[in-house]
Image: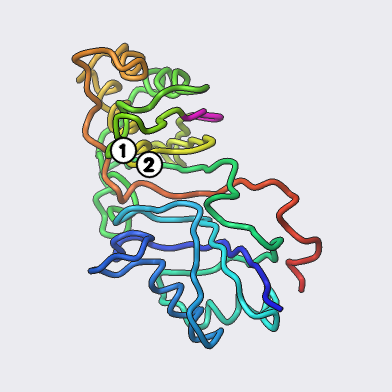
Amino acid sequence: MDRTVCARLHYDGTHFVGWQLQPDGRTVQGEFEAVLERLCGGRVRAHAAGRTDAGVHALGMAVSATVPARWTPEALRRALNALLPPDCWVADVREAQPGFHARKSATGRAYCYRIGADAEAASPFRRPYEWALGRDLPADALQRGAASLVGPHDFRALAVHTGGKENCRCTIRRARWVRRDGERGWEFEVAADRFLHHMVRMLVGTMVEMALGRRPETDLDRLLTQADGVRASPPAPARGLYFVAAEYPDRWFRLGDDTA
C-alpha cells in the first residue's frame, strides 16, 4: 500500500531557476524529487500548488507525492529535512486522501510581496528577500489600488504568456497593503482562487508606479477592463515575492495525520 502525503515546504528561491524541472539550472522540484527517490528507492513525482519562477520564495508551498506506506508523515518530515539542501525546509507533512494533487485540488492560493522603504533595505541580508525600493509610498494610494482588485476580474492585461483564448478570469478574495514593522516598508497580501503568470508582480509594479505618481490611479481600472492604449508597468522584482499558502477542502485530509 502507498500513502498520499502533502508537505508544506519553505524555500529560499535565490539560487533556484524556479519550482518546475528545467533542462538547465537548479530547481526546487529537482531537489525535492531527488531526496524522495533516495528515501523511497525509486522515482517519485512531486506536484506543487504553484510553479514559482526564478528567485521567488515560498513560506508554505504545498507539495503532494505518493510514497510507500512505511513512511508516516512525521517520519517523512524528519527524513526530508535531514537530506534536503539548506535552502529548503519542510514545516510539516500531512496524510491526504488518495487522488489528492497539490495543484489540481487547490481551491485558492495566497501570496505576499515585500517592499523595503528604508535605507537598510539595500543590506545584503535583506536585498535578496525584498524589493529594495529605498523610499516610502503613500498609504492611501496603495490601499485604493488594492481595494479595486477585490472580486472577479479578467487579468489578461496584468499577466504574461496568455494566449488569446486563455481563461484569464480570477477572483481576488483578499488584497491589502500592510505596513511592515519599524517603518521598514510595505507588504502586499493577496489571495485568490487562481493566479496567472507574473500576475502578482505586475500588480505590484503597477500599484507602486501609481503610488509614486508616475501614472494615473485610474489606469488600474482601465487595465482590468482591457482599455485600449493602456499597458501594465514592468513586473516588480522576483525576489520580493513569496508563495504563502494553498487552500484545500477539509475532505482531502485524514484525521490525526500530524501525529502519525
Numbered circle sitting on residue 223:
none
Tell me the crowding category of disc 1: few under 14, some 14 to 19, or many 20 or more residues within 10 angstroms, Cα based: many
On the image, numbered disc 1 is attached to which residue?
117
- In the rendered image, which quarter contains the C terminus? bottom right
Q: Position of residue 161 (x, y in %)?
A: 27, 39
Sequence order check, earlier mark of 1 and 2: 1
Give the residue furthest to the right: 255
Tell me: residue 33, above or below residue 54.
below
The image position of residue 81, as x and y in percent, is 53, 77
Q: Amino acid at mark 2?
A: Arg
Q: x, y (%) of residue 67?
A: 61, 76
CB contact under 8 Å: marks 1 and 2? yes
Q: Which SS class for mark 2? A: loop
**x 60%, y 42%: residue:** 107
Q: CA distance from mark 1 to mark 2?
A: 6 Å
Identify residue type, mark 1. Answer: Ala
Q: Position of residue 112 (x, y in %)?
A: 45, 42
| Depth order, front residue of 216/159 | 159
Q: Splitting the image into 4 quarters, where does residue 55 fall?
A: bottom left
Residue at numbered disc 2: 184
Q: Which residue is painted at 43% across and 36% down in the image?
A: 188
